[in-house]
Amino acid sequence: MGKSRNPRRGSGAAEAVVETVDGGLAELMPDRDRARAWTLLIDGAPQSHVDLDDPSYLSFEYQRRLGHVIDLVAPAGKPVHAVHLGGGALTLARYVAATRPRSTQQAVERDAALVQLVRRELPLDPNARIRVRSVDAREGLAKVADGWADLVIADVFSGARTPAHLTSTEFLDDVRRALKPGGCYAANVADGPPLAHLRGQIATAAARFSELALVADPTVLRGKRFGNAVLVASDAPLPIAELTRRAASDPHPGRVEHGRALLDFTGGATPVTDEAAVASPAPPPSVFR
């Protein structure tokens, strides 16, 4: 597909950039309220929002919640080792680089054509230590050294669904292998009523990690609408009080569930294995209207 003007050039109103990538039709849409900010859509589904002038700005609700996890995984400003499964426009990798200078990061984004588009149109800070691998998420995770990561973030969607092989106990075994002792895993989980997928993902994480928390819009947790929940897991105590405070103060306030209440929320769901895993449910068309 052809593309319009490059978002880095000149002055005046920016125009959309549209290209075919491996995963479908990619659109970079300018944010009319922020001079050098862009939303990435794939086949009409919003994937990422990036502000080149302020990489610490997180627009999407679920990315703000993942940002809270990034903020709390280590003392403020301390560099970390982070792995991002699912790159999109590399929003969260940029956020880590901006808020935790000198961090070392690995991003895994299977769509090589998308990576090229993002690198060209939304260039990374040349001083950011971000390595991008264009391979499958589990293949990329397997290349991470044992005990390397302070943080592993899973935000992988094929279209608008998380692939089945990234929802299992076997996948989490490799996440644990890559994490340092006390490291943190955070996943963007999309689901709607009756929340069977979300309940299964909590049960799966509980089978591999001793400490869990879930951050989501209360209406999503009540099964009233389709939406995103951020699942956080570790073998070290999680900063529940501060995570709760930050989620509650967001523009779209979120609720934090943890402990017995979170395990009760699973409703008896059992851990998901590779053999039984299925992709997350497709969102209804109304979600993106």
Image: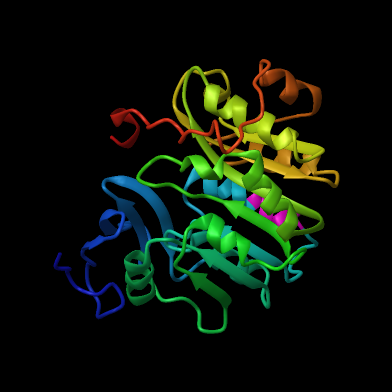
Q: Is residue 217 visible?
A: yes
User: Image point 47% across, 58% down: which residue?
Assistant: 136
Count of residue discs: 0
Query: Quarter-wise, where is residue 100 in the image?
Result: bottom right
Q: Can residue 56 be seen in this view?
A: no
Q: For the stretch drawn in magenta, what is the main secondary structure? A: helix
The reply, left or right, for residue 183 in relation to residue 31 is: right
Q: How is the image coloured?
A: rainbow
Q: Is 122 one of the magenta-colored residues? A: no
Residue 210: x, y in percent? 82, 38
Q: 218 or 154: which is nearer to us?
A: 154
* Position of the N terminus by quadrant: bottom left
Q: Is 69 one of the magenta-colored residues? A: yes
User: Image point 59% across, 41% down: which residue?
Assistant: 250
* Position of the C terminus by quadrant: top left
Q: 18 or 169: which is nearer to us?
A: 169
User: Image point 51% across, 54% down: which residue?
Assistant: 58
User: Image point 80% across, 44% down: which residue?
Assistant: 238
Residue 73: x, y in percent? 75, 56
Q: Which residues, given as a range, are shown in magenta?
A: 68-73
The reply, left or right, for residue 235 in relation to residue 135 is: right
Residue 169: x, y in percent? 66, 40
Q: Is residue 121 above or below residue 216?
A: below
Residue 5: x, y in percent? 19, 73
Residue at the left extreme? 2
Residue at the bottom extreme? 126
